[in-house]
Amino acid sequence: MGKQRVLSGVQPTGNYHLGNYLGAIRNWVEGQSQYENFLFVADLHAITVPHDPAKLAENTYTLVALYLACGLDLEYSTIFVQSHIPAHSELTWLFNCITPLNWLERMIQFKEKAVKQGENVNVGLLDYPVLMAADILLYDPDKVPVGEDQKQHLELTRDIAIRLNDQFGTPDKPVLKLPEPLIRKEGARVMSLTDGTRKMSKSDPSELSRINLLDSPEDIQKKIKRCKTDVTKGLWFDDPERPECNNLLTLYMLLSLKTKEAVAAECKDMGWGQFKPLLTETTIEALKPIQQKYQAVMEDKGYVESVMRQGREKAEAIASSTLLKVKTAMGYSMPF
């Protein structure tokens, strides 16, 4: 048997931060040799909220360069851009026609984002979980890396696949494979530096809430120096009354590559005045090789374009095959 296939993606919205890296991209890198990886730039998802069209293509290019800078190896990973493959949009429409509206209205992230956007809620914001299902199911993946907050979306994906299989397949010959979640316990949710109860996010208006992968050492020092802490002496994990303490210790653990037990022993008697410089130095050193490789990759535009082109060709072949299978099952005639 060959390797299991894994699929995941990140939106090209700029300001890629430690949450993106530690919660997703580094996990892809560490496990990439174990799987056949399809990793994409989710630029169709990026326009469900107001966006700057002048920066969309630039952010897409930047994200591909960051994928490479973070250590994704083309021997194991196929990197492609979502909008370069029309099958994503076409399969979304087919799924729309079998997905009950109430399935989408109950999605937690839609409710949260709809509150933030007020009257500017578009159909894409409601429907993007169906696009996400199409993203996933087009490539017949065995595993989908997800954080705890994304499990509901994968459950919806499985529900859509089951519904299509029930309506247009047979028990012994389903149309689509049901993917399983691939969840890493540590680092699945990296929290804000200004509020340890909220996820680190590109959409947070405060730059102090996150450490971006391309931040300078001076910016990293400033953000950690100003991050929210508490007045309790000593540092320890998993105290519900100290979310910021748990978050910062977790960041240190993940960036230093130390075990939870080792960090707990090292930091138990520290105060914030001693710990923050330690976290700052560790963060700067962890990001330095990524930043250096990113600069090198960005200087070779032709290489980045070749990665995107080769990724499109490989991904499109698989996506087109899956789309044809779905359309055939649903009764469509094929073009002559």
Image (cartoon, rainbow, N blue to C red):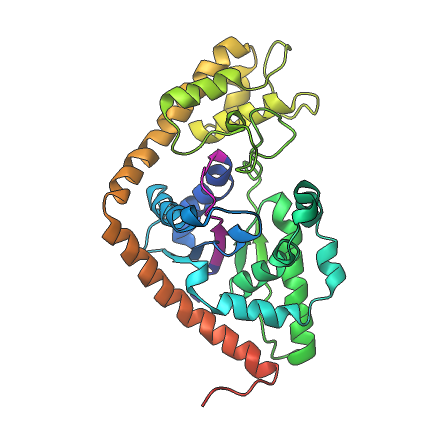
Is 12 within the magenta? yes
Q: Image quadrant for the N terminus?
A: bottom left
Q: Nearer the viewer, residue 105 or 188?
A: 105
x and y, in percent, of residue 259 in the image: 50, 29
Q: Who's the residue at 44% across and 14% down the image?
A: 277
Q: Is residue 259 visible?
A: no
Which residue is at a point 46% across and 68% down the rendered structure image? Answer: 86
Question: How many numbered tags mark residues here?
Answer: 0
Quadrant location of residue 333? bottom right
The question of residue 213 being in magenta is answered with no
Q: Which residues are magenta?
A: 6-18
Compared with 243, 147 (above or below) is below
Find residue 40 and report its image quarter.
bottom left
Q: Is residue 59 above or below residue 256?
A: below
Q: Nearer the viewer, residue 185 or 211?
A: 211
Would residue 288 be visible to someone looking at this image?
A: yes
Where's residue 180, x and y in %? Answer: 59, 57
Q: Residue at x 63, y 79 (%)?
A: 172
Residue 150 pos. (x, y %)? 61, 48
Image coordinates of residue 83 in percent, x first then y, are 45, 61
Q: Is residue 289 above or below residue 220?
A: below
On screen, residue 104 versus residue 222, left or right, reads right
Q: Quadrant of the C terminus?
A: bottom left
Q: Residue at x 67, y 52 (%)?
A: 152
